[in-house]
Image: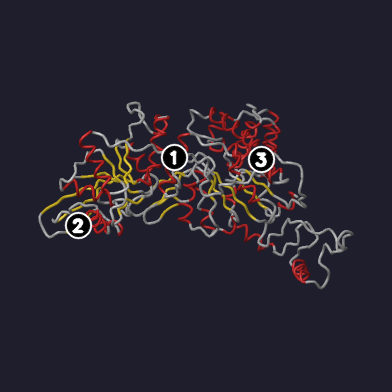
């Protein structure tokens, strides 16, 4: 007898056929099919859960085979499938052919939740499986997909021959409940109808980010940076922001989710499925907001790209249809940063192993934030003079002999000037170049938007109210709707994903704009990719203005957002 199960692996996982055979011999369980540690240990958990659930474990030799036998299996999600297959082989319960079972067993017979249940049900449905038994604590994940199929079957992988609501599942809390459900299935022909599971949407939840994101209205000034973020959100463009500490780089970047357009229904299901594979769904919520991932700069290449013994999605896959924000980007390991170059172009990452390879989706937009130099003072605000102020009688510049004076003197010895436009930077030119070397020209060439950010100056409470995220999001959503209509037959979502043929087709430009573009490209010495990047950004700016034709001012603004960032000293020129 056999039962279907699922093992999370890569972006899709694999469907496993659990086969059981009972024969005369010394009592025991043998498991074949490249079973790893947790699967081999299932023998003892299954035996104890049988006894503690009131069932008699067969006193014969039992052979369990996990097919396909050439793929390694790990994790405890195969506990319940093994137990059910043994029961079927011992004629304790009948098992239908088209049934997938998932769950980890405790010794008491209770079922524990497992990761990847939503992905398992989605894969099973594509393979023609219509009935599922899952742990009670995973019921909300299955309900997400079941409700999405009822709402729109064609956008969740259904063919014209499939009918809405074909998935039927039973959520069991114990092994005994799973057995009872199969007995009811044998008598009535259907699994028992589960209690209704309310499905909450994660509209206010940001996976990997801050659930209570900052509103743009909370940040005073930085209008250039805010405009750059608006363009990035509208067109899905990559962005580099750099400047001294405390200038609002991270704060506004973390406010970025508040202006992003909502995911389409099929996108929301796909994002939720990927988070299910990684075991990062909490509360069974459908993720309707684009994910925002912000890993620490100590992250490994496997953590960012994906990998491990059993290949799991990395941060770029968990940022699929959303944003990957790398704060303190030059502090990341160089090979980690450079490994983003291919996914930014291909929107997938291929993990190659000796026995197989895995393709993980990675359609994300990248935001990089960096200080302008290692000490952070390049471009920072500096005192204007060395005389005491009338109001406080305190020195604005440290007097001779004070503790900070030695630092100022050290700065001058490196060619810096405390009261100059470099903000009293303590770094030598070589140090600054080494710091920026992590962000190579090949990576920066893929960044369409660059925004230098200077210190905002004195912030006085009660300043004029800034434009809110809700107001900006209206413009972003309108531009996103224009792109959705434009590309509905092209297989792409946003302006940033246009190929050269799309640029020729969808970026009509006036004669004067064409002359301005050619002049800027020649003066800046842009690469072919950079030229296409400017046209994509100009297309997005025109969409925000609801214009079909790209005009000169669209091109000039796109060029302005591109001209900084290749030289760290741009922060001084931008000020």
| Residue 361 drawn at (x, y percent) | 45, 44
- Gap between marks 3 and 1, in whole Å? 39 Å
Reading the image, the residue beneath label 2 is: 30
In the foreground, 269 or 202 = 202
In the foreground, 210 or 528 = 210
In the image, is 199 to the left or to the right of 184?
A: right
Mark 1 crowd level (few <14, some 14–19, many ≥20, 10 Å Cα): many
Mark 3 crowd level (few <14, some 14–19, many ≥20, 10 Å Cα): some
| Residue 399 drawn at (x, y percent) | 83, 68
Asked if 180 appears above or below 493 in the picture, the reply is: below
Q: Which mark is residue 521?
A: 3
* Residue located 68% across and 54% down the image: 568
Q: Which mark is residue 270?
A: 1
- Gap between marks 2 and 1, in whole Å? 37 Å
> Considering the numbered disc 2 on the image, is that residue within a helix, a strand or a loop?
strand
Mark 2 crowd level (few <14, some 14–19, many ≥20, 10 Å Cα): few
- Colour scheme: secondary structure
- Gap between marks 2 and 3, in whole Å? 69 Å
> Considering the numbered disc 3 on the image, is that residue within a helix, a strand or a loop?
helix
* Residue located 47% across and 47% down the image: 318
Outermost residue, right side: 390
Mark found first going from the N terminus, 3 or 1: 1
The answer to whether residue 351 shows anywhere in this view is yes
Mark found first going from the N terminus, 2 or 1: 2
């Amino acid at each position: 007898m056999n039962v279907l199960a699922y093992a999370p692996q890569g972006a899709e996982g694999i469907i496993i056929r659990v086969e059981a055979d009972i024969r005369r011999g010394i009592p025991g369980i043998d498991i074949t099919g490249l079973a790893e540690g947790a699967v081999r240990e299932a023998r003892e958990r299954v035996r104890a859960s049988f006894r503690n659930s009131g069932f008699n474990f067969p006193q014969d030799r039992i052979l369990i085979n996990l097919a396909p036998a050439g793929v390694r299996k790990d994790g405890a999600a195969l506990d319940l499938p093994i137990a059910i297959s043994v029961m079927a082989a011992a004629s304790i319960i009948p098992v239908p052919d088209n049934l997938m079972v998932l769950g980890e067993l405790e010794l008491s017979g209770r079922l524990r939740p497992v990761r990847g249940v939503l992905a398992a049900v989605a894969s099973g449905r594509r393979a023609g499986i219509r009935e599922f038994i899952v742990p009670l604590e995973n019921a909300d994940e299955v309900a997400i997909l079941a409700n999405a199929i009822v709402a729109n079957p064609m956008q969740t992988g259904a063919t014209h021959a499939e009918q809405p609501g074909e998935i039927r599942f039973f959520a069991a809390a114990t092994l005994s409940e799973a057995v009872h459900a199969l007995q009811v299935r044998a008598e009535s022909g259907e699994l028992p109808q589960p209690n209704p599971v309310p499905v909450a949407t994660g509209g206010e939840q940001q996976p990997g980010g801050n659930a209570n994101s900052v509103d743009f209205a909370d940040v005073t000034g930085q209008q250039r940076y805010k405009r750059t973020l608006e363009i990035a959100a509208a067109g899905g463009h990559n962005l580099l922001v750099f400047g001294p500490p405390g200038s609002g780089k991270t704060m506004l970047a973390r406010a970025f989710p508040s202006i992003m357009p909502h995911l389409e229904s099929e996108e929301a299901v796909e994002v939720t499925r990927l988070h299910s594979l990684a075991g990062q769904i909490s509360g069974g919520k459908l993720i309707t907001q684009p994910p925002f991932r912000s890993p620490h700069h100590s992250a490994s290449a496997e953590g960012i790209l994906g990998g491990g013994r059993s290949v799991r999605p990395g941060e770029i896959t968990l940022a699929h249809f959303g944003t990957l924000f790398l704060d303190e980007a030059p502090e990341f390991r160089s090979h980690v940063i450079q490994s983003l170059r291919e996914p930014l172009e291909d929107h997938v990452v291929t993990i190659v192993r000796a026995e197989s390879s895995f393709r993980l989706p990675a359609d994300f937009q990248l935001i990089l934030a960096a200080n302008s130099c290692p000490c952070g003072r390049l471009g920072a605000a500096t005192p204007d003079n060395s005389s005491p102020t009338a109001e406080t009688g305190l020195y604005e510049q440290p007097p001779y002999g004070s503790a900070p004076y030695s630092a100022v003197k050290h700065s001058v010895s490196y060619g810096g000037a405390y009261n100059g436009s470099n903000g009293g930077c303590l770094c030598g030119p070589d140090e600054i170049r080494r710091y920026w070397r992590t962000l190579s020209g090949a990576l920066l060439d893929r960044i369409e938007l660059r925004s230098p950010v200077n210190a905002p100056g004195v912030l006085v409470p009660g300043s004029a109210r800034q434009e809110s995220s809700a107001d900006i999001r209206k413009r972003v959503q309108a531009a996103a709707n224009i792109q959705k209509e434009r590309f509905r037959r092209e297989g792409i979502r946003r302006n940033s994903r246009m190929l050269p043929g799309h640029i020729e087709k969808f970026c009509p430009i006036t004669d004067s704009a064409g002359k301005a573009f050619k002049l800027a490209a020649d003066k800046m010495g842009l690469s072919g990719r950079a030229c296409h990047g400017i046209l994509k950004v100009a297309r997005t700016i025109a969409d925000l203005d609801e214009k079909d034709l790209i005009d000169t001012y669209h091109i000039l603004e796109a060029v302005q957002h591109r001209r900084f960032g290749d030289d760290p000293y741009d922060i001084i020129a931008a000020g």
